[in-house]
Amino acid sequence: MKSIAIIHHESMHEFYCMVDGQKCFVQYTIHPGALEFTHTFVPATLRGRGIAKQLYDAAAAYLKEHGLKAIPTCSYAAKYFAEHQ
């Protein structure tokens, strides 16, 4: 799995990256002491490359750095945090 540059766009409440000219992202809402992960999107042509995992790896690092908890509403987020905590 090739490492990609993940950008945290705080004012848009998302972690995203551009792969082959296409945007992949994780969106969240802010709660006291937590981020609620509400949506994950990777275009169909890019799926299976581990991009969503890398997005959530970056999100998890942000949570740890800031002492926040995850509220995984999105199905992919629920799977990721169940496997990585």
Image: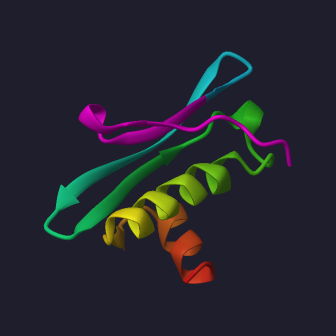
Q: Which one is nearer the viewer's eye here, 64 or 47?
A: 64
Which image quarter is the C terminus in?
bottom right
Question: How far from the left and from the top, in percent, is residue 26?
Answer: 46, 46
Q: Residue at x 52, y 75 (%)?
A: 81
Which span of residues is magenta-colored? 1-17
The residue most toward the top is 21
The spot of residue 23 in percent (x, y) is 56, 26
Quarter occupied by residue 9: top left
Q: Residue furthest front?
A: 65
The part of the image, by quadrant, that contains residue 36 is: bottom left
Residue drawn 36% across the image and 71% down it: 70
Say whether residue 13 is magenta. Answer: yes
Q: Residue at x 69, y 46 (%)?
A: 51
Q: Is residue 50 left or right of residue 64?
A: right
How is the model colour-coded? rainbow
Percent across and percent down for residue 67 are: 32, 72
Identify which residue is drawn at 75% across, 31% down.
45
